[in-house]
Amino acid sequence: MMDKGPAKPDVVIIDYGMGNLHSAHKALEKMAAGKKTVGISSDPEIIRQAERVVLPGVGAIRDCMAEMHNTGLVPIIRECLQSKPFLGICVGFQALMESSEENGGVECLGHFKGQVKFFGEYLEDSQGQRLKVPHMGWSQVNPAQPEHPVWQGLPAGERFYFVHSYYVQAENPEQVLAECNYGPVKMHAALAQDNVAAVQFHPEKSAQAGLKLLENFLYWKP
């Protein structure tokens, strides 16, 4: 756990001990270009005072959810989900769903209706070639809401960087911001509703496309 950056940053990356904090912080600072301050914090009051927040996540969803509860950050996360521009990344995205199949079933935050499902042990493409799980590397993403402010300037078929063995299936198609195919699986690569957006891929590792998405988030006014 750490606090990094100005005392009252405009943008806070929530530190609950399970996020890819350094690269996300570096990418957001680059796109803020001195116009907004970016910090990392586990302090509920600093998070509460921020203009917008980012919830990252890596590793197992059970561990991530356990740390959110152990650090006492679930109430402030829920508060931010209702009150300010919010971006979930990777497992931080999955944590916003109702539940995950991982580890025999894990209850998540339930902000979006839907589940996080396992790709399976044996996944094949249309030519019958075995696909690796986890899904790791660059894949094309197609927007379902290309006009959404968070997706501005990003063409259909843009590639983003993924690392995951579980994928999101949301119940409400109106919340789907973007989709991605991995073999026979069509997954929801991004969701958005009201002040909350979330992405399965890592924008901080996705070159110019990812930086553009982060820049859009920084100036998004839902």
Image: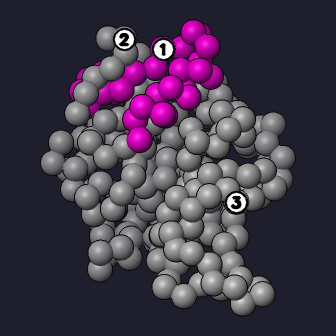
Q: Residue at x 45, y 59 (%)?
A: 94
User: Would residue 133 appear left or right of 106 to someone viewing this image?
Assistant: right
Q: What's the mark number on residue 6?
A: 2
Q: Is residue 170 visible?
A: no
Q: Quadrant of the C terminus?
A: top right
Q: Position of residue 127 (x, y in %)?
A: 78, 87
Badge 2 crowding class, 10 Å Cα cut-off, few under 14, some 14 to 19, many 20 or more, is few
Tag 1: amino acid: Thr
Q: Nearer the viewer, mark 3 or mark 2?
A: 3
Amino acid at pointer 3 = Ser
Percent of width and height locating residue 129 = 69, 85
Q: Amino acid at mark 2?
A: Pro
Spatial CA distance of label 3 from label 1 is 31 Å
Q: Secondary structure at mark 2?
A: loop
Dot 3 alpha-carbon crowd within 10 angstroms: few under 14, some 14 to 19, many 20 or more? some
- On the question of residue 135 being in view, the answer is yes
**Residue holding disc 3:** 139
Labels 3 & 1 near each other (Cβ < 8 A): no
- Can you tell which mark lies on residue 153? none
Marks 1 and 2 sit apart, C-alpha to C-alpha, by: 7 Å
Magenta segment boundaries in residue numbering: 20-47
Residue 39 falls inside the magenta stretch: yes
Numbered tag placed on residue 37 in the rendering: 1
> To which quarter of the image does residue 45 belong?
top left
Do the residues bearing badges 1 and 2 touch, measured as CB atoms within 8 Å? yes
Q: Is residue 4 magenta?
A: no
Is 176 left, or right, of 148 in this rendering? left
Q: Earlier in the sequence, mark 3 or mark 2?
A: 2
Q: Return the x and y of residue 134 as percentages of the image width and height.
A: 51, 69
- Please rate how many residues cluster around mark 1, counting C-alpha atoms within 10 Å: few if below 14, some from 14 to 19, many from 20: some
Along the line of sight, the residue nearer the viewer: 104 or 137? 137
Q: Residue at x 36, y 26 (%)?
A: 40
